[in-house]
Image (cartoon, rainbow, N blue to C red):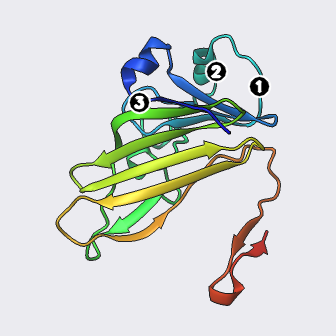
Amino acid sequence: MTAEVRLADAQADEALGRDTVVLRAAGTALILDIQGDAVPRVVHWGADPGTVDDLSHLVLATMPPRPLASVDVPVLSRLIPQQADGWVGRPGISAHRDGRFPHLRLLQTAPPTVVETAEEGGGLWVQAGDGEVGITVHTEIQMDRSGTVRIRHEVVNDGPEVLTLDSATGLLPTGSQATEILDFTGRWSGERTPQR
């Protein structure tokens, strides 16, 4: 049986001095920067760095440089990549309203909830939204005791018009050590076909 402690408000996180969340299990760690009102940023995902005295130094050390001939701020690897942050790849949430593609600017609408377990692992729940577009996204990220990370997005249409959701993608950076990526694809009877 797993005991859970939920920190449901920002005051609890501030009391603990929490600007970062570390999920670790089985030699793997996922470190997230949760400060500010933007969607949390992935600071590290990979081998567990062990005990770090001051995670703010790690957050600063992993801040990417400002790209040349691009936006004026560093492009950060967030749980939900979006064009508003300067991301040029596929956005984490892609949707349209009658062919009009809104460019989302998701900001946290509630303080993140950290789920700590008696065993290794844990989780983080984030609620973000774009009031102008009329979308709310609930993101749940969990690490189980074997070190496997699961990300799930729930997209809610808060607007009066029909919203067609094209994709809700969970993205994590792989790092330069990844030389091969295996995923599963397919349609109908050929689902979950491995491809490299």
Spot the residue most to the front. Answer: 1
Residue denoted by label 3: 8
**Image location (x, y in percent) of residue 136:** 32, 52
**Image location (x, y in percent) of residue 37:** 36, 32
Residue denoted by label 1: 49
Mark 2 vs 3, N-terminal side? 3
- Viewer-proximal residue among 46 and 123: 123
Identify the secondary structure beneath mark 1. loop
Residue 156 visible in image: yes
Q: Residue at the location (41% across, 50% down)?
A: 138
> Closer to the camera: disc 1 or disc 2?
1
Which quarter of the picture shows residue 25?
top right
Which quarter of the picture shows residue 4?
top right
Using the numbered discs, state the Cα–Cα distance from disc 2 to disc 3 in whole angstroms. 25 Å
Q: Residue at the location (68% across, 39% down)?
A: 1
Residue denoted by label 2: 58
Using the numbered discs, state the Cα–Cα distance from disc 1 to disc 3 in whole angstroms. 27 Å
**Image location (x, y in percent) of residue 18:** 50, 19
Viewed as shown, does residue 163 lie left or right of 176?
A: left
Using the numbered discs, state the Cα–Cα distance from disc 1 to disc 2 in whole angstroms. 10 Å
Compared to residue 176, the image places residue 100 above or below, namely below
Three-letter amino acid code at the position of disc 2: Leu
Label 1 packing within 10 angstroms: few (<14), some (14-19), many (20+): some
Asked if the residue at tag 2 contacts the one at tag 1, i.e. Cβ–Cβ closer than 8 Å, the answer is yes
Three-letter amino acid code at the position of disc 1: Pro
Task: Name the quadrant of the C terminus.
Answer: bottom right
Q: Residue at the location (77% across, 25% down)?
A: 49
Three-letter amino acid code at the position of disc 3: Ala
> Closer to the camera: disc 2 or disc 3?
3
Mark 1 vs 2, N-terminal side? 1
Mark 1 vs 3, N-terminal side? 3
Spot the residue most to the bottom. Answer: 189
